[in-house]
Amino acid sequence: MNKCTERLYNGIVKENPTFVQMLGMCPTLAVTSTAMNGLGMGLATTAVLTMSNIMISALRKVIPDKVRIPAFITIIASFVTIISFLMQAYTPDLYESLGVYIALIVVNCIILGRAESYASKNPVIPSLFDGLGMGLGFTVGLTAIGVIREFLGAGAIFGISITKELFDPIAIFSFNPGAFFVLAFIIAGINAHEIRKSKKTGEKPKLRRIDGCSDCTNVTCQGKDVPGEAVVTEEMLETTRKNLLNSQAAKPEQEKKEQPVKPQAEKKEQLSEEDEDQETEVLASTLEEKEQKKTKKEPEVKKENKPKTKKNNKRKGDK
């Protein structure tokens, strides 16, 4: 397969940013109330992604590594401004319906991610097809969610009424919670298809999920490595119970280890306070003893010296 067509296939199917990589969820959930909004947002992102990839790939040897991220953001922001002005001039209704989310294309992780991981390391033509494939994949994802939400929430597709007269639309799908429901059902359907495919081929299923479940003790979860054909046995359940019991038994031991730390610190503080009190008492006692000695010595000296001199003088004068 040619490299350019491979980049298109990866962006639309194999590495779809919405349904595979789970990127760009902010516009995916906020803008897709109608199919037209999803299509417009997807095409605007595709244009920015393609042009920014071309420019970054052409300047990849000129941009220094230390300032590459600010340079990428500057290039992306300039193209977003151009697309925003064009939409405001030629599609004002779509521009008003998308609102601030057009400006937020600048911080879309799909665009910055492709610029960092692919466009800055590859020539211009493959980078062009990489941006085009990722943008079309993002457009397909947004449009699919918008079609389902508009059909269920308004009984229409691209503004054309289809089932509005047959039954009452489900209004919740026109609001923000409907986006979560539709995306969840689509991802669940894709995961179910991957599990069935893995059972036939014997390979590990490539599930669409967020990483970070390595510490989970639930063996019944389809996202973990389950031996065989993902069949849960009694031994697996026993191992999960043992793991839970061990984790619960380890908690009190840790608490016991942590508890003696506080009393030791308190004892040290008490001992230090007692030592200070003893030192102050010793100093006070020594000062009192010195004062008592001074007061005792001074009157004794006066009584002994004065009377003796007077008696001696008188005796000498009498003689």
Image: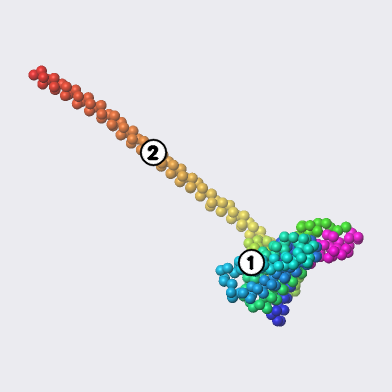
Q: Which residues are magenta?
A: 143-167
Where residue 31 appears, as percent x and y from the top left, is 76, 62
What amino acid is found at the position of numbered circle 2 in the picture?
Thr
What amino acid is found at the position of numbered circle 1 in the picture?
Ile
Counting residues from the start of the chain, the first of labels 1 and 2 encountered is 1
Residue 128: quadrant of the picture? bottom right
Residue displayed at 49% across by 45% down: 266
Q: According to the image, label 1 marks what residue?
A: 73
Where residue 305 appears, as percent x and y from the top left, is 19, 26
Residue found at the far front of this picture: 89
Residue displayed at 59% across by 75% down: 61
The residue nearer to you, when weighing 30 against 149, is 30
Where residue 210 appears, as percent x and y from the top left, is 68, 64
Would residue 315 be found to the left or right of residue 21 on screen?
left
Q: According to the image, label 2 marks what residue?
A: 280
Residue 240: quadrant of the picture? bottom right
Residue 165 magenta-highlighted: yes
Q: Nearer the viewer, mark 1 or mark 2?
A: 1
Q: Residues within 10 Å of mark 1 (few under 14, many from 20)?
A: some
Residue 270 magenta-highlighted: no
The residue nearer to you, when weighing 101 against 318, is 101
